[in-house]
Amino acid sequence: MARQLLTESLVLALIGGAVGVDAGVWGTNLILAASPANLLDLQRVPIDWRVLAFACRDHFACRVAVWILAVVPFGARGHCGNIEGGKDAARLRERQRRTVRSTFVVAQIGLALVLLAGSGC
């Protein structure tokens, strides 16, 4: 099951990355075609492939990290832990899930505040 989750995650990352790059190229060309001719004298805007490679590497690293966070709670027991461990184990896993979820929410709010501060708002 863990390998299937990793495979699905990486395939979705690849498809999402390809759609994102295509939308970026298409949107840039659309904006250039719609802009007035004397606007900044831009005839074409090239894509920096080094930045694209960096973004792809980070994107895949985040996907693998999220996969690890999704698989680790199952551990060696598989997805039937509630049946095997009883109510106490189920409560512990639920508390762990809430802790991870709360950590993600705190991290997301922190990143949003950093972005707001960096943008000058």
Image (cartoon, rainbow, N blue to C red):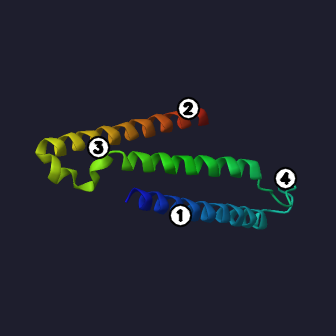
Q: CA distance from mark 2 to mark 4?
A: 29 Å
Q: Which residue is mark 1?
A: 11
Q: Secondary structure at mark 3?
A: helix
Give, as a three-letter code, the residue at label 2: Ala
Q: Residues within 10 Å of mark 1 (few under 14, many from 20)?
A: few
Looking at the image, is mark 2 or mark 3 earlier in the sequence? 3
Q: Secondary structure at mark 1?
A: helix
Q: Secondary structure at mark 2?
A: helix
Looking at the image, is mark 2 or mark 4 earlier in the sequence? 4
Measured from the top left, where is residue 5 in percent x and y?
Answer: 42, 59
Looking at the image, is mark 4 or mark 1 earlier in the sequence? 1
Residue at left 55%, top 47%? Answer: 61
Q: Tell me if label 2 and label 1 are in contact, CB under 8 Å.
A: no
Looking at the image, is mark 1 or mark 3 earlier in the sequence? 1
Is 70 drawn above or below residue 120 in the view shown?
below
Looking at the image, is mark 4 or mark 3 earlier in the sequence? 4
- Nearer the observer, disc 2 or disc 4? 2
Work out whether residue 71 can be spotted.
Answer: yes
* Dot label at residue 117: 2
